[in-house]
Image: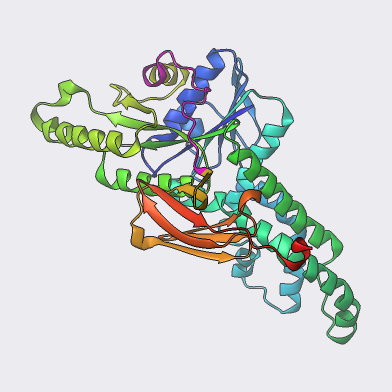
Amino acid sequence: MRIIIYTGKGGVGKTSIAAATAVKLARQGKRTLILSTDAAHSLADSLDVSIGPDPVQISENLWGQEVSSLRETERNWGAVQSYLTKMLDKAQLTDITTEEMLVFPGMEELFSLLQMKEHAQSGKYDVLVVDCAPTGETLRLLSYPNVLNWWLEKIFPNERKLIKLVRPVAKLVNRIDLPSDEVLDSIEFLARGLEEMQRIVLDPEITSIRIVLNPEKMVLSESKRSFTYLNLFGFNTDAIIVNRVLPDEAGEGFFAHWRALQKQYEEEIVSNFQPLPILRAPMMPTEVIGLAALEELADIVYGTQDPSAILYRGRTEIIREDDEGMLLELMIPFVNKEELDLVQTGDELTVNAGSYKRKVILPRPLMGRQVEGARYNENRLIIRFGKRIMTEEGKG
């Protein structure tokens, strides 16, 4: 099973590139599902066919699906919503806005992403092509499982025990219904599902993320931030796709200035993202709508390459040893040294990179060692660890 996730700033043509990839893969004989998790779906418009919340066969070996976030929310959060509704009714909060309080911001999109896990485990498809929401939302959601898993491991077991003890008393004294086992099971099932989804997405042999951008200043800046985040969290980015590149013949008259600007940003893209493969999609002479136009676009972008191949393998974490101790290297491009901060708590390391934060559970070779220093060099944060601290039990 291969999963290819396309992300990028809104309006860069991400949906067209994702759909073109899916059409080409289907023509190669691979059972391909193109999945849109963007709340503002445009996949059906790109394919020029009607598709819905369940996979619909479009042509031989090609299926399409526009995930219904409302339906996925009901499936994954229904029991919890029902409990919260009863609580709000008892509090006589029947305002129309209370319905919006039952789902936390971003969770509807997160439930949509769970479809990736289900399709990956179904065995029905060879390749899953995912047209994600614009960059900011997608990246934020992909980091949710880290937070939920920490809460599930550290807090949830104790809360669950406490609720079981207090539930009978609370009902008698305050007439408050604490969460039932069904509600707690639903929360745990969701968290475990998200953890499993993240495991699949983080596996570089299964999942690749491809950033789609235009040769423009603001788009390039956001793409660099996205790449920083993806590296920080260990996602495998295997290609950059530069879309809507003006042809050389456009370098005259009105478009001369724009073509010159694009060339400038194209050079910057190459220097910033090497050694990642950089694929180019030209500004097409007609609208890219329908299977034939999408296949033509894919042939230009990929040429003789197999779009389902892993186009680049790069390690974002390296553990090595030198004469002075153990080193952990994290690939974090496009940040200033002043934006980096480290906090160690036991065998958990928190890395702050600007507005992003990642918790790293130290791998076995680094467990029991304290951070002695760190430096940032050539897009890598290099953290030095001292000798392993032996406990009294270990000494014995």
Check if residue 303 falls in the magenta segment: yes
Indicate how the structure is coloured in the image. Answer: rainbow
Foreground residue among 371 and 288 = 371
Q: Where is residue 316 in the image (x, y as percent from the top left)?
A: 49, 42
Query: Looking at the image, which residue is at 32% across and 44% down?
Result: 219
Q: Can residue 321 be seen in this view?
A: yes
Between 45 and 205, which is closer to the camera in this rendering? 205
| 42, above or below 327, in the image | above
Displayed quadrant of residue 92: bottom right
268 left or right of 330? left
Q: Quadrant of the C terminus?
A: bottom right
Report the span colored magenta: 299-317
What is the tally of numbered marks visible in this picture?
0
Where does residue 373 sit, x and y in percent of width and height?
A: 46, 61
Residue drawn at (19%, 36%) of the image: 264
Magenta stretch: residue 169 in it? no
Residue at the location (43% across, 52% down)?
381
Q: What secondary structure is the magenta-colored segment mainly? A: loop
Q: x, y percentage for residue 154? A: 72, 65
Outermost residue toward the bottom? 173
List x then y, in percent, for residue 131.
51, 36
